[in-house]
Image (spheres, helix red, strand yellow):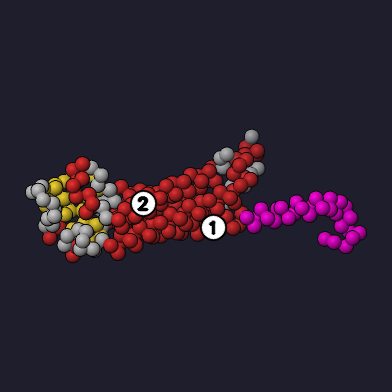
Amino acid sequence: MSAEKQEYHRASNAVVFGGIITYAAGLLLIMAYISPYWIQSYQETFSSFKHMGLWEYCFHEFRFPYFQFDKLFDGCHQIYSDEVYVIRKWLLPGWLMSVQAFATLAVMLSFFGQVVIAMILIRWPLHFVLHYEWLLSCIAFVCDAASGALLFLAVAIFGGQCWRRDWLMYPNFNHLSWSYGLAVISFMLHCVGAFFMYLDARMGYQLRKESRNLVMQMQSNPQSHHGSQRSGYI
């Protein structure tokens, strides 16, 4: 039984390294996606705005100057909660909605790519993976590359727009925080993971092409191995 299990080849080192990097990138992406520390205020400024993430804002006795009623916003609230409904248009400008969309797509593609890499590593289902391993590696490469590209757009847009004065007041009191840093690191790791998966996909495709050429040659001349010495071919 043990001999039968060893008949098929294991996953290449490129898949192993690419998988480890992709899983690390996915973990950092999830942490950045759910944590409310993309930007925060300096503690010594005593700003009424504390910090925010893609889905949550935190205030301390904040008054929105363009709201006609004297309402205090205090504590942390989800962007789509009823508590901040009256200022949601200000909290959620169009560019931030695009950042949310890019980050959400990156999470979905990263997770799907991790599932594909897991299938390659554990060889399940065995018959399908052995026949289409190069195709699965291509899919994982596309998922990693697309996730990296989407995260690049997300961090680039957020980093360029978060200092707008028509968004958070007193932008000079704020600074990019660790959640944003995790997103940047995740973007770079996804690109590195995509590179390893590309190497494996290219190698797998070349091996598949060589195997098909060998089979075609054997089918076109099935008795070549009997007459190789007489014909002069090696």
Name the amino acid, label 2: Ala
Q: Which residues are magenta?
A: 205-234
Residue 105 locus on image (x, y percent): 40, 50
Q: Name the residue tied to disc 2.
A: 101
Q: Amino acid at mark 1?
A: Tyr
- For the image, the number of numbered tags is 2
Q: 162 above or below 91?
A: below
- Horizontal relation, residue 109 to residue 203: left or right: left
Residue placed under numbered mark 1 in the picture: 198
Element class at badge 2: helix
Q: Which residue is at 33% across, 50% downward? A: 33
Q: Which residue is located at x 65 percent, y 38 percent? A: 4
Kindly check if marks 1 and 2 are in contact, taking CB atoms under 8 A apart as contact: no
In this rendering, would 8 be left or right of 231? left
Question: Label 1 neighbourhood size at 10 Å, few (<14), some (14-19), many (20+)?
Answer: many
Q: Main secondary structure of the magenta part?
A: helix
Where is residue 71? Give x, y as percent. Answer: 10, 47
Would residue 173 be visible to someone looking at this image? no
Q: Is residue 225 left or right of residue 59?
A: right
Image quadrant in which the N terminus is located = top right
Q: Secondary structure at mark 1?
A: helix
